[in-house]
Amino acid sequence: MRFIGNKENLVKNMYSILRSKNIYGEIFCDFFAGTANVGKFFKGLNYKIYSSDILYFSYCLQYAYIKNNTIPRFDKLLDYLNIKNNYLFSDSNLELILEYLNNIDSFEGFIYNNYTIGGTENKEYKRMYFSDENGKKIDAIRIEIEKWKNYSLINDNEYFILIASLIESVSFFSNVSGVYAAFQKKWDKRALKPFILKPINLIFNEKENEVFFGNSINIIKNIKTDILYLDPPYNERQYAPNYHILETIARYDNPIIKGISGMRDYRNQKSSFCNKKTALIDLEFIINNADYKYCILSYNNEGIMEKENIISIMSKVGKVDLIEFDYLKFKSNSNNNKKFIKEQLYILSI
Ligand SMILES: C[S@@+](CC[C@H](N)C(=O)[O-])C[C@H]1O[C@@H](n2cnc3c(N)ncnc32)[C@H](O)[C@@H]1O
């Protein structure tokens, strides 16, 4: 999915760097998980994963990708819906359920009423985050999933797999240039296509992986890990306002919203890593209070914490290596618009 700082394209490189330095282990902790892509990669290598984020929609992704270790069968639900259960290939049962959801009647709910032209035409702020039809589809699907959960027709794994499929799919139909702090004033082609829910690709390992929703700084003390991976925000831009609609779809809690972007309150989801002073204080707290063999920090040369300060904090507790490599920041066809930043990997060995 489109997410600032998504490490999907970097995680393999990061892994080969760790291997070249003989860094291995059995437990991996990803406490700024975002899309959960880093945890997914290490889960695939059979590490036991601890994962956490301050955003609830990230927790939904983590639950589906990291905690879940079973193929969802949806037995009870298929029975209730009178859909023939595919006993031989139960992984395709998810597809049967998504097909059902893709065909349910649209509904004018919170997303339609607040984030589409049709739903906001008589309101103070007119918003065009989704086409009218897609807004209604997202509402109908989200409400149906919650109903199934309340009727105990699906278990927690099945519930979060459906929510994660919805969150991942919504990104492909949103009229935004990347983040949800603003909608585009003209329709992007992607937003005009009819909404289709697609299944997520599940991964399995043989471990009891654990996922958390909350401020990682409060949880970190209870974790013992081999590799502690930190990928905090790099600058002042908070994540919660930039992804507020995904948060609302995941929670579906009818929040009070404000302004032209229809922002929900995010005061208790502000990250201390978006402020130069508090970022260093909390980095030091984590480095000193967590129980790990290696701590790996992803950062870049434009981040608000300075290299010297990071190294100074880390070198009080162990040996620090800094690896830097070029990474293309803005993708563009024109060479003039290409901008490389230095992606950094701080490796602290205790
Ligand atoms: C750079 S992104 C991580 C990207 C992630 N590695 C990926 O591949 O998608 C930073 C993440 O840290 C989360 N975050 C910021 N402060 C946090 C905190 N104190 N506790 C937990 N998560 C936090 C943000 O919500 C965001 O998802």
Image (cartoon, rainbow, N blue to C red):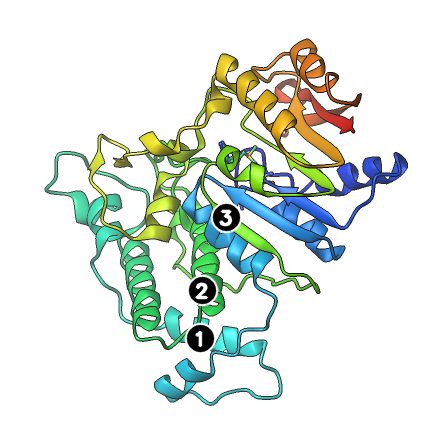
Residue 32 in the image: x percent, y percent? 56, 37
Q: Residue at x 35, y 33 (%)?
A: 268
Q: Residue at x 45, y 41 (%)?
A: 214
Mark 3 vs mark 2, CA separation in Å: 18 Å
Mark 1 vs mark 2, CA separation in Å: 9 Å
The answer to whether residue 50 of the structure is visible from this angle is yes
Closer to the chain start, of discs 1 and 2, is: 1
Answer with the quarter of the image where residue 202 lies: bottom right
Characterize the local packing of mark 3: few (<14), some (14-19) or many (20 or more) Cα atoms within 10 angstroms: many
Q: Residue at x 34, y 64 (%)?
A: 141
The amino acid marked with disc number 2 is: Leu
* Secondary element at tag 2: helix
Q: Is 6 or 285 nearer to us in this picture?
A: 285
What residue does disc 1 label?
Answer: 97
Q: How many marks?
A: 3
Dot 2 beta carbon under 8 Å from ligand 1: no
Dots 1, 2 in contact, CB < 8 A: yes
Depth-wise, is mark 1 or mark 2 nearer the camera? 2
Asked if residue 333 lies left or right of residue 145, the reply is right
Outermost residue toward the top in this view: 308
The amino acid marked with disc number 1 is: Ile
Residue 58 in the image: x percent, y percent? 48, 46
What residue does disc 3 label?
Answer: 212
Quarter of the image where the C terminus is located: top right
What residue does disc 2 label?
Answer: 162
Residue 21: give its label.
Answer: none
The answer to whether residue 330 of the structure is visible from this angle is no
